[in-house]
Amino acid sequence: MNIKIVLEGKIKEPCFKLGIEVYKKRLLNKVEILEISDIYEYLKNKTNSYVITLEIEGKMLSSIEFANKLREIETSGSANEILFLVGGSEGLSRKVKNLSDFKFSMSKLTFLHQEAVLILIEQIYRAHKILNNEPYHK
């Protein structure tokens, strides 16, 4: 299953870039990071995608529940890719939130959008390890 993290904005800080690259390599570059200026315009061209928005009001999941959610999406066959949408400093627009298949909250805390991408890709890696019964997640 293709996974894309779509960020409205740029990852500028070297520490976040480095961390993200570490997890991309661990995932054998199976996760793509897209830095774009308008998520809503990007979504207009997307069909057959499962859209997950990162929202503070979304549902919080444990790492195991997150891994199971990814497996559920993959095995359902309803989409050919998972799009994680991360808003910029202003967050996601209401029209983008309305296109969400699942509203996900990583925490009640607010993170920098660059930081959110790093945390998210680490959790995707953790989910990969959990689903493959490999050590890492404990």
Image: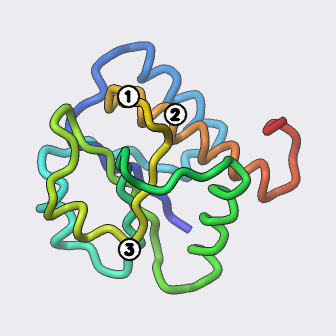
Q: Check disc 1 and report its element: helix, strand or loop.
A: loop
* Residue 120 position (above or below residue 16): below
Question: Which of label 3 and label 2 is nearer to you?
Answer: 2
Q: Return the residue at label 3.
A: 49
- Residue at the top extreme? 14
Three-letter code for the amino acid on which mark 1 is drawn: Phe
Whether pointer 1 and pointer 3 mark residues with C-beta atoms closer than 8 Å, the reply is no
Looking at marks 3 and 2 on the same chain, the residue that comes earlier in the sequence is marked by 3
Point out residue 77 in the picture as x, y percentages from the top left corner: 56, 85
- Place residue 96 in its image quadrant: bottom left
Point out residue 108 in the picture as x, y percentages from the top left corner: 44, 37
Question: Which of label 1 and label 2 is nearer to you?
Answer: 1
Three-letter code for the amino acid on which mark 2 is drawn: Ile
Residue 111, labelled with which disc?
Answer: 1
Rounded to the nearest whole Å, what is the CA distance between mark 1 and mark 3? 25 Å
Looking at marks 1 and 2 on the same chain, the residue that comes earlier in the sequence is marked by 1
Three-letter code for the amino acid on which mark 3 is drawn: Ser
Quarter of the picture containing the N terminus is bottom right
Q: Nearer the viewer, residue 8 or 110?
A: 110
Q: Check disc 3 and report its element: helix, strand or loop.
A: strand
Q: Return the residue at label 2.
A: 119
Looking at marks 1 and 3 on the same chain, the residue that comes earlier in the sequence is marked by 3
Whether pointer 1 and pointer 2 mark residues with C-beta atoms closer than 8 Å, the reply is yes
